[in-house]
Amino acid sequence: MKQQKEATREGEWVEVVCGFCRGTRKNPFASTKCPVCGGRGKVSAQEPLSLCAYCGGTGAHGRMTCTVCSGKGVITVKGRVQACPACGGRGKDLRSEFRLPCIICGGRGVVPI
């Protein structure tokens, strides 16, 4: 018999795989433990979750931790939201040559309705 996954409540903290190291526990850019999860391979995040639009869930921007999700790869999304009209839900300022986080949504890719 299959076990059903228990539904989580809004605001509940859950453990998710670290976006920066992808659960390997190692820094992907150096021979040290992951600076985001501290070598645990998992991070705590608050429900409801959404993939970070700025880093695409990788937890990294270039060789640094993502400044939007702090390297977790996910963000907490509270209330009703819609895609950001300025960046189209991508989380990046399309006019910036450096691809900085969108100034309207802060790189989250969504704004409250």
Image (spheres, grey):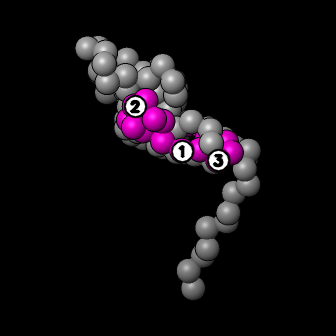
The tag earlier along the polypeptide, 1 or 2, is 1
Residue 64: image location, x then y, percent? 36, 18
Residue in the foreground of this view, choosing between 25 and 7: 7
Residue 80: image location, x then y, percent? 64, 47
Secondary structure beneath dot 3 equals loop
The numbered dot on residue 82 is: 1
Q: Quadrant of the N terminus?
A: bottom right
Give the residue drawn at x 61%, y 67%.
5
Residue in the foreground of this view, choosing between 42 and 97: 97
User: In this figure, which residue is indicated by the disc labeled 3?
Assistant: 80
Amino acid type indicated by mark 3: Arg
Distance (Cα) linking label 1 and label 3: 7 Å
Q: Main secondary structure of the magenta part?
A: loop
For this view, does 45 lie left or right of residue 51?
A: right
85 magenta-colored: yes
Q: Are marks 3 and 2 in contact (CB under 8 Å)?
A: no
Q: Are marks 1 and 3 in contact (CB under 8 Å)?
A: yes
Secondary structure beneath dot 2 equals loop
Q: Quadrant of the C terminus?
A: top right
In which quadrant of the rendered view does residue 27 lie?
top left
Secondary structure beneath dot 1 equals strand
Q: Which residues are magenta?
A: 72-91
Taking 18 as reference, is 12 above or below it?
A: below
Amino acid type indicated by mark 2: Cys
Amino acid type indicated by mark 1: Gln
Residue 32: image location, x then y, percent? 38, 20
Is disc 1 surrounded by few (<14), some (14 to 19) or many (20+) residues within 10 Å? few
The numbered dot on residue 87 is: 2
